[in-house]
Image (cartoon, rainbow, N blue to C red):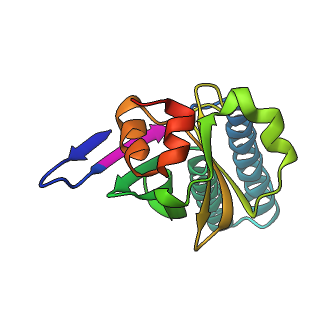
Amino acid sequence: MKKECCAMGDVFVERMIKRKMTGVDYALVAGILVAALLLSVVSFVVGTLMFGNPMVTLLVTAGAIFGAYKLIGTRLLEYEYSITNGFVAVDKIINRSSRKRMTAFECDTCEDIGRYPEQEERLKQRSFDQRIFATQYTDRRDSWYMIVQSKKTGKTLVIFNPDEEFLDAVKRFIPRPLRFEKFGRN
């Protein structure tokens, strides 16, 4: 999803990034479904055959299906990045139903920015109050990093997948010496 607006010099760019499911995600979904099915079968055996009461089976099966739905939904993640006049917010959206603010910061607090895969080893050695991974791929390919100061999360390493337009908006607000060092005079 892509939203943008520029009126009277204001900058607003918003991007939605859907996290790609991995083999681990699919294995967890399969495990959850098998567990729900086993719980339903066990409740049938215990509720109907031992006690002669099918209501127990119905309640446990309904609970297992609802629980499986909720657990599977936690694997469906999207990230929303928005920048408004230099203020960046990164939100996690779970199953398109709940939103959690991961961090928010002013671009002028940026200490460093660059492509993440090229600096991954160096960044793993550094200490941060918080590391936020809001990327499309779990292997972090095509991602960028920013080291920022946030009121909510302190010194924060943010790894994300900006497109060119979002990156251009960020460049406008990071400190000028850092912008020249990382991006040249463009």
Q: Residue at x 48, y 30 (%)?
A: 184
Quadrant location of residue 3? top left
Q: Residue at x 56, y 54 (%)?
A: 110
Is 19 above or below relative to 70? above
Q: Residue at x 78, y 42 (%)?
A: 123
Q: Percent x, y for residue 91?
A: 49, 57
Of 25 and 114, which appears nearest the observer?
114
Q: Percent x, y for residue 78?
A: 49, 45
Q: Is residue 72 left or right of residue 96?
A: right
Is 99 above or below relative to 33? below
Quadrant location of residue 24? top right
Q: Percent x, y for residue 79?
A: 49, 47
- Which residue range is magenta in the image? 13-19
Q: Is residue 97 left or right of residue 75?
A: left
Q: Residue at x 49, y 59 (%)?
A: 108
Magenta segment, prevailing SS (helix, strand or loop): strand
Judge whether residue 104 is colored magenta: no
Can residue 62 be seen in this snapshot? yes
The quadrant of the rendering that contains the N terminus is top left
Residue, far left: 8
Q: How many discs mark residues in the rendered view? A: 0
Q: Percent x, y for residue 43?
A: 75, 57
Of 102 and 46, which appears nearest the observer?
102
Of 80 and 60, which appears nearest the observer?
80
